[in-house]
Image: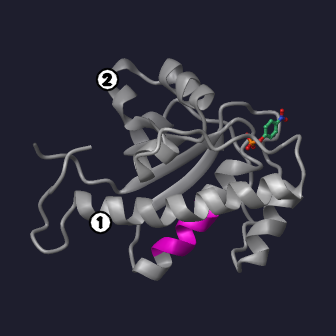
Amino acid sequence: MSVKPINSVLFVCLGNICRSPLAEGVFRAVLAEHGKGLVIDSAGTGGWHAGQEPDRRSIAVAAKYGVDISGQRARKVLPEDFSRFDLILGMDRANVRDLKALAPHTLRDRVHLYLDFATGKAVDVPDPYYDGAEAFASVYRMIREASEALAKRLDAIVSPTSGQASSTM
Ligand code: 4NP
């Protein structure tokens, strides 16, 4: 079965200040290493932090590994995101449930659980907002591993040799 190539990815969490800005920033860094160009962005199902920079703990853990996410700004998921992005990845099951409820029926299959899609492990990236630096370090490690896996997965979907879709989603 052929699949539509994925040219754009949206990472989504609740507030768009802790997890999804890290997923966006780390994936952008991994893509740069792979020499791949994709449109990527992040957003929150909630809009309380719209316009704000990422949580300082996310900025700090990313900076520790050489990734600067301080220029990113939070925004709420928009109705048009479901047609603009080929792949929409929720950090946890609640995000996925909320996204599927918001998505037009015909575009619901663009929404997946982030770690499940990237690594095949159907687990949540837990919300670290009310926790300490160790929770942010753990989230960073999950996101770093998932970003590498996601880049490989997307490479596999569109084979660089044939230019044809080579696996199913
Ligand atoms: P995030 O974390 O969804 O990873 O950005 C949260 C940030 C803020 C809130 C909850 C989770 N909040 O309730 O304001």
Residue 168, image quadrant: top left
Left or right, residue 104 beside residue 145: left
Give the quadrant of ligand 1: top right
Question: Assess mark 2: CB under 8 A from ligand 1?
Answer: no
Relative to 58, say whether 117 is above or below.
Answer: above
Q: Which mark is residue 106?
A: 2
Relative to 2, say whether 141 is above or below.
Answer: below
The percent position of residue 115, horizontal first and vertical second, equals 50, 47
Left or right, residue 16 beside residue 77: right
Residue 50, image quadrant: top right
Question: Assess mark 1: CB under 8 A from ligand 1?
Answer: no
Left or right, residue 9 beside residue 64: left
The percent position of residue 86, horizontal first and vertical second, equals 37, 45
Magenta stretch, main secondary structure class? helix
Q: Is residue 29 magenta?
A: yes
Relative to 26, say whether 127 is above or below.
Answer: above
Q: Secondary structure at mark 1?
A: helix
The residue at 35%/57% (across/down) is: 7
Q: Which mark is residue 120?
A: none
Q: Secondary structure at mark 2?
A: helix
Label 1: few (<14), some (14–19) or many (≥20) C-alpha neighbours in 10 Å: some
Amino acid type of the residue that numbered disc 2 sits on in the rendered structure: Thr
Q: Nearer the viewer, mark 2 or mark 1?
A: 1
Q: Which residues are magenta?
A: 24-31
The residue at 33%/60% (across/down) is: 154
Amino acid type of the residue that numbered disc 1 sits on in the rendered structure: Asp
Q: Pick the quarter of the image with the N terminus.
A: top left
The percent position of residue 120, horizontal first and vertical second, equals 40, 46
Figure label count? 2
Q: Is residue 64 magenta?
A: no
Q: Pick the quarter of the image with the C terminus.
A: top left
Determine which residue is flagged by label 1.
Answer: 155
